[in-house]
């Protein structure tokens, strides 16, 4: 579904990604793990064209088999939710309009420009129900908690029925109850055929169904494998640069120093 080859991204002379290559496949649920500053968010910004890799031999960004794509077509196949998007959506727009705006890559609905069909309304209602946020339909976004707003943005990403959903730091700033609700919703998406990819520094975000783990450090992918091989004390201590302890229960992992 997604193939990146020889990707280098620089800002102000600093390399944020360094000759990175990566393939994400349909049905392969993947967690990209790494400390803050590892390059995880930059990687997603390459996919959304917020950042552009250096033009160099062998460099290629291929999404769903194409090296160039129409944004309207892409949003129906790939949904991305990031903390930056959540900050942009902290507005007076009601939840309903923010979810519907996923059809137009906007923040909210502009009634002179955007035509909302009955099918769009039905898809919006289904997404609200799935994420258990129907009661917030008419609530302004700025009145929601972080966990509620996160679920709204996932609904916004899902409203076009994409094949793959990519979440950047999905549980960041969420309390324990909100984390549990969010993870239950993500497990439901996996059960219903969505391919899920997350970037995180928190092992607790990694759902039991995610069995491909990528380690990122200093703008590079330094390991690619299964949980039982990579979620060990030695491997995680190397990744985070400090001695850690790791434990698992019910398919979930946690790490502490």
Image (cartoon, helix red, strand yellow):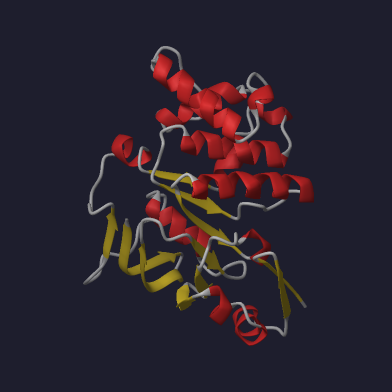
* Residue 225 in sight in this render: yes
**Image coords of residue 185 (percent x, y):** 60, 44
Classify the position of the N terminus by image quarter: bottom left
Picture quadrant of residue 13 = bottom left
Classify the position of the C terminus by image quarter: bottom right
Q: Nearer the viewer, residue 257 or 230?
A: 230
**Image coords of residue 156 (percent x, y):** 51, 34
Q: Residue at x 73, y 81 (%)?
A: 244
**Image coords of residue 187 (percent x, y):** 58, 50
The answer to whether residue 235 is above or below residue 16 is below
Q: Residue at x 69, y 30 (%)?
A: 142
Q: Nearer the viewer, residue 201 or 46?
A: 201
The answer to whether residue 224 is above or below residue 78 is below
Relative side of 118 to 153, left or right? left
Residue furthest toward the bottom?
234
Relative side of 170 to 22, left or right? right
């Amino acid at each position: 579904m997604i193939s990146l080859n020889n990707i280098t991204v620089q800002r102000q002379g600093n390399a944020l990604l360094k000759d990175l290559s990566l393939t994400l496949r349909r049905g392969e649920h993947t967690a990209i793990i790494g400390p803050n500053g590892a390059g995880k968010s930059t990687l997603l910004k390459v996919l959304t064209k917020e950042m552009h890799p250096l033009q160099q031999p062998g460099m290629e960004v291929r999404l769903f088999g194409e090296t160039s794509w129409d944004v309207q077509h892409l949003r129906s196949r790939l949904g991305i939710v990031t903390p930056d998007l959540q900050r942009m959506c902290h507005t007076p727009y009601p939840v309903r309009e923010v979810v519907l705006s996923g059809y137009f890559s906007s923040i909210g609905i502009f009634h002179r420009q955007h035509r909302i069909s009955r099918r769009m309304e039905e898809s919006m209602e289904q997404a609200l129900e799935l994420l258990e946020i129907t009661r917030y339909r008419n609530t302004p976004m700025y009145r929601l908690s972080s966990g509620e707003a996160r679920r709204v943005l996932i609904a916004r990403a899902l409203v076009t029925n994409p094949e793959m959903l990519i979440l950047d730091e999905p549980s960041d700033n969420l309390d324990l109850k909100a984390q549990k609700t969010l993870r239950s919703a993500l497990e439901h998406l996996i059960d219903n055929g969505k391919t899920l990819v997350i970037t995180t520094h928190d092992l607790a975000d990694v759902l039991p169904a995610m069995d491909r783990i990528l380690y990122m450090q200093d703008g590079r992918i330094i390991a690619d494998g299964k949980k039982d091989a990579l979620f060990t004390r030695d491997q995680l201590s190397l990744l985070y640069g400090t001695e850690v302890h790791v434990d698992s229960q019910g398919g979930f992992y946690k790490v502490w120093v």
